[in-house]
Structure formats: structure tokens, C-alpha cells
Amino acid sequence: METTLANHTIKEETTSFLIDRKARRLSPRTIDFYREKLYAFAKYCAERGVIYMEDISPRLLREYLILLGESHNPGGVHTFYRTVRTFLNYFEEENDEELPNPIRKVHPPRVPNQPIVG
């Protein structure tokens, strides 16, 4: 059977990504961090009917960041952005299909530069 983009569910690719991170011997805490952030993203996508990797769009990503901003501080939103970016870059590297990487069109959220008071 020939693999097509429609065979790449977000859930399956999240599992593949986490296996890759384990194979790279990243720390269990780092793996848990990725798992938590990516499961939240996958849940967001599923709630919007986005099941396949090919259906992730820059607009979906921007709307996700806006939603996160309602309950997270700027640094927290940025951690989700970095995690999703790492995941989408991994998917792009792993697959030879001609699928535009939607994160390339999404600028990272701004994090204010606040001096440490001590």
C-alpha cells in the first residue's frame, strides 16, 4: 500500500515523535514535557475536526496561540509554540511528501523582556 498524506494522523505522528525523542535518549522529564504540550495541541485539533497532519494550517496554529494566551502567560504560550514547531519540523524531516510546513508562516509569539528583580 502506498503511503499518502491522509495516512498521517496527528495522533500517530505524535506517537512517532515521542518514540524518536526516547530513541535520542532525552530525559524522561523532557519526554513528559513534549507529551503534555503535544497532547493538548492534538486535543485542540481534534475538537476542530482536524485529524490529519495535512489539515494543520497557519491559521489553526495562530488561533491556538490566541486561545493559549487567554490562560497562559507569554512565556507559557511561547513554550507551546516551540514544542509544536519542533514537532512539525520533525514531521517535515521524516516525510518526503510535498507538504508545506505551516509553522514556517507563523511568527513566534512575542515574550516581553522583563528584567529580573532581585
Image (cartoon, rainbow, N blue to C red):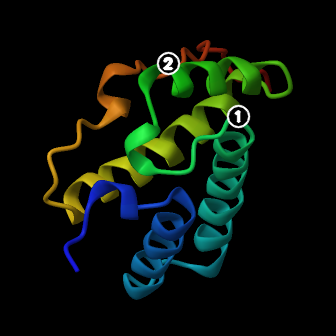
In the image, taking residue 83 as reference, residue 7 lies left or right, namely left
Give 115 or 7, whichever is nearer the viewer. 7
Q: Residue at x 26, y 61 (%)?
A: 4
Q: Residue at x 19, y 73 (%)?
A: 2
Badge number at residue 34: none
The residue indicated by pointer 1 is: 76
The image shows a total of numbered marks equal to: 2
Q: Position of residue 36 (x, y in %)?
A: 71, 59
Please identify the quarter of the rendering in which residue 28 is found.
bottom right
Q: Mark 1 against mark 2, which lies toward the viewer?
A: 2
Give 108 or 45, whichever is nearer the viewer. 45
Q: Quadrant of the N terminus?
A: bottom left
Residue type, mark 2 in image: Arg
Q: Residue at x 23, y 36 (%)?
A: 100
Residue type, mark 1 in image: Gly
Identity of the residue furthest to the right in this view: 71
- Report helix, strand or loop for mark 1: helix
In the image, taking residue 35 as reference, residue 60 lies left or right, namely left
Q: Quadrant of the C terminus?
A: top right
Please identify the quarter of the rendering in which residue 35 is found.
bottom right
The residue indicated by pointer 2 is: 59
State how far apart marks 1 and 2 are (Cα).
20 Å
Q: Residue at x 43, y 23 (%)?
A: 58
Disc 1 residue crowd, few under 14, some 14–19, many 20+, Cα 10 Å: few
Please identify the quarter of the rendering in which residue 34 is found.
bottom right
Q: Position of residue 38 (x, y in %)?
A: 62, 55
Q: Which of the marked residues, 1 or 2, is nearer the chain's N terminus?
A: 2
Q: Position of residue 60 (x, y in %)?
A: 55, 26
